[in-house]
Amino acid sequence: MSSSSAPIDWSPMVIGFAAGFISRLISIRTGRTHYPGYPSGYISQLALAIIAAMIGASVIVSLVGKEFTAATFLTLAATQFRDVRTTERQTLEQEEHFILVGRGAGYIEGIAITYEARNYLSMMIALVTSAVTQYTGVVIGGIVGIIAIIIGEIYMSGPKVGDMIEVEPAKIHFEKGSLLYVGDVMMMEVGLPHSRERYQKEGMGVLLTPKGRRGQSVLWNVAQRQAISHEAAAAVGTQKDVGYPEQTPLCRMDMPKGSGRAGLSILPVENNMEALIKAIKNTPVLESGKWSALTSPVLNRKEME
Amino acid sequence: MADAPTPVMFAIVTTSKHAVIGGMAPVFMADDEPERDRIAMWLCRITNCIAHDLHNGTLVLTVNQASSS
């Protein structure tokens, strides 16, 4: 800002910045993505939040001050936020090889997109708030800021698995000697008696029943089921280590029948059905599984309606 | 991703001589079922493979090629 221009009204910038920053702060929760977990993670997220809110808040002020160069540079800076997604994705992908139950590519992409979008959202909220403040005053600007934050929150929280799918506990049992069943859904073949005993003694099973067509298309998505098993394992733990592939938590469709239901089997560390069901219900619905209603011929059957 | 990784038959453990003939995987003969299960478990833990019971006295051990675990 050159000193020769008219005195600058700082209030739009301050209020816009505050609104954008708060909107980003609300979303920095460790929660389901298990990131950020350490102060270093928070610091980098906070730094990005400050930059994003700054950019959004200062565009209007610089335009009003006839500083077009500054405004152009700000839009340039905004494009730098594309890298946030790549960085986040790379971090999670590298981690993927060393966690026992992977998130799956779909989930990782979803988390990465959310992080990127969060920064843009805070930028937009800052922009809107500072614009309103500029033209109507501090009080209305503040109110609009709060409303923008609330709308942003509602808009950004996508559907959860629990919205579309009924989750209920089911019994784990073996049929024909070695086939692992959850309720009446066949999961896999466990050939080792040792592992079978383990499943019978400590295993937990959950049946996922879709509430409608949307729920079904969500369940048929492999990435979605991987995300569900990851969340399940994160909630109750899993008795598994490298070299014990048959003790991996599994989420499989009721396949020979194709009824659209799925079962989940897990060997938990902590036998807590409530936590397990809550974790599954809170798993976000992945973008890739949201609209693919016609991937399975089963969905077209009349009796499924 | 959507397709299951191709399993490769790693070994065959059996109590019944007549159930298996030749093939690309080594065949481990066991005298009785506990012995068979013990061998299968050892091989599983050593090679990160999965045992499948054919219910004719034979266990087939397979390794998933793209096994991430």
Image (cartoon, coloured by chain):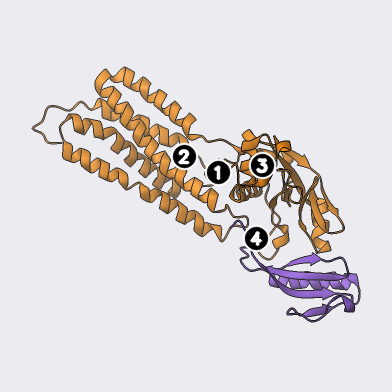
* Residue under pointer 4: B4
Name the residue carrying label 3: A299
Q: Tell me how far mark 4 sits from mark 2, CA to CA.
A: 36 Å
Point out residue B56 in the picture as x, y percentages from the top left corner. 88, 68
- Who's the residue at 82% across and 62% down the image? A194
Q: In this image, B45 relative to A123: left or right?
A: right
Image quadrant in which the N terminus of chain A is located: top left
Please tell me whether residue A249 is drawn above or below residue A215 in the rendered image: below
Near-viewer residue (A300 or A182): A300
Q: Amino acid at mark 3?
A: Leu
Report how far apart the C-alphas of labels 2 and 1 lie in the structure. Answer: 20 Å
State if disc 1 and disc 4 touch (CB < 8 Å).
no
Task: Tell if the residue under mark 4 belongs to the same chain as the one under mark 3.
Answer: no
Given this view, does label 3 or label 1 mark the residue nearer the observer? 3
Q: Nearer the viewer, residue A227 or A29?
A: A227
**Lateral position of residue A14 relative to residue A4, left or right:** right
**Structural crowding at the residue carrying mark 4, measured as other residues with C-alpha within 10 Å and reported as few (<14), some (14–19) or many (≥20):** few
